[in-house]
Image: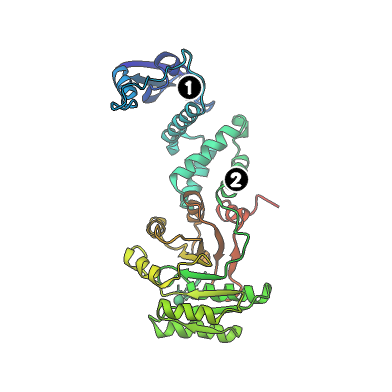
Amino acid sequence: MRLKTYIVGSMTEAIPLIKRDLGADAMILNTKKVKTGGFLGFFQKEKLEVTAAIDPIATRESEREHVPAEFPKVQPVKQPAVPKETATELISELKNIKQFMMQQMTEDRLPETFQILKKHLTAQEVAEDIQAELIAKIISNLNDETDHTLEKVWSAAREEILAIIEEKQPPKVAQDPEIICFIGPTGVGKTTTIAKIAADYMLTRDKKVGLITADTYRIAAVEQLKTYGSILNLPVKVVDSAAELKHAIEDFAECDIILMDTAGRNYQQKQYIDELERLLPNDNKVQINLVLSLTAKYEDMKKIIDNFQSIAMDELLLTKKDETSSSGAILNLIFHYDIPIRYIANGQNVPDDILTVTSELVADFLMGEEKHA
Ligand SMILES: Nc1nc2c(ncn2[C@@H]2O[C@H](COP(=O)(O)OP(=O)(O)O)[C@@H](O)[C@H]2O)c(=O)[nH]1
Ligand SMILES: [Mg+2]
């Protein structure tokens, strides 16, 4: 094991030195701040002590492992004398820097405006990894400390949030679905949301809508959808099995869109997902829309989504935005999962309380509206 310690101004400065002395396989063992100097221009009186190491034996052995023993004729590929700056190396450097930034980002070490931003994002329940990425990007984009005013940091955060959403949200499917099946936990607002969306298809888009419910679990649930059906003057069919569902879909052949309600289930349990799989036709005309309430814990939302590996979920729909002041889960879901979110429901009123998701809407929820025209 060869160890080497560097006193540097920043991690970016340390990496080329480590690579020069110890090679590209070196590992960073420890970083600590020492007085005198500065880190990325903020910590004026501090420098960074970086300890890196390389284990020449382990490195050689791991190189050997790449050559399969069964093929003795294979010659090890000769490394060029001066290793070229490859994309992989750059990526691993960036990872090192990011990892380091995350370590540094304990609140008391950040400049004050960033501490305020971080507190705000934490209160909004934005996940730690997203916070770290946002702050790292803002720091690297702002020119110097004169840019660290609260206003500039806030609007930079907004811009980064917009960029994340635009990058992560897959483009909406060009073709409208024929059948949308709404699934999700009990009481999240599936039936209410179906009524809102049905009204939108019918009144704004002039589409012929059919309603199906497979929620025969509670009599009141059937009645609830039938009530909306009669208010909107839409046909409602009740189904109890895959065969009945198939017939109902055939009966609605001349509808432009079928919206299907299901019983609320605890989808943290896999058995309910299997049950759903047996009910739904294996047909890509059917779009699955998972409805989750923003009042739920993010960890619980994740568990449900992760359980849906066997059924490809097409969209997420979030409800009860009006009942919570924190919007971090929206950004967390967009960042951690590549599932489109088309609507957010924000109240009990049918048909009005539903919003179409845009990057601006989510940025407004998170950072406040006053910062843009
Ligand atoms: N505050 C609020 N309440 C909602 C929203 N969506 C639905 N609800 C209410 O949540 C309760 C359950 O709704 P329901 O549609 O029956 O949920 P389901 O069991 O998932 O079908 C009802 O009291 C709805 O009025 C929403 O976006 N915000
Ligand atoms: Mg319902």
Asked whether residue 348 appears in the rendered view, the answer is no
Badge nearest the viewer, 1 or 2: 2
Image: 370 above or below 222: above
Residue that label 2 marks: 163
Judged from the image, the secondary structure of the residue bearing numbered disc 2 is helix
Is label 1 in contact with label 2 (beta carbons under 8 Å)? no
Badge 1 density bin: few <14, some 14–19, many ≥20, Cα 10 Å: few
Image location (x, y in percent) of residue 177:
57, 67
Image: 277 above or below 210: above
Tag on residue 45? 1
Badge 2 density bin: few <14, some 14–19, many ≥20, Cα 10 Å: few
The structure residue drawn at horizontal position 53% and vertical position 70%, both measured from the top left corner, is 180
Asked whether residue 184 appears in the rendered view, the answer is yes
Image location (x, y in percent) of residue 324:
49, 62
Image location (x, y in percent) of residue 61:
29, 22
Judged from the image, the secondary structure of the residue bearing numbered disc 1 is loop
Image: 351 above or below 121: below
Image location (x, y in percent) of residue 224:
48, 83
**Quadrant observed for ligand 2 in the rendered image:** bottom left
Q: Residue 244, located in which quarter of the rendered image? A: bottom left
The structure residue drawn at horizontal position 55% and vertical position 34%, both measured from the top left corner, is 139
Q: Earlier in the sequence, mark 1 or mark 2?
A: 1
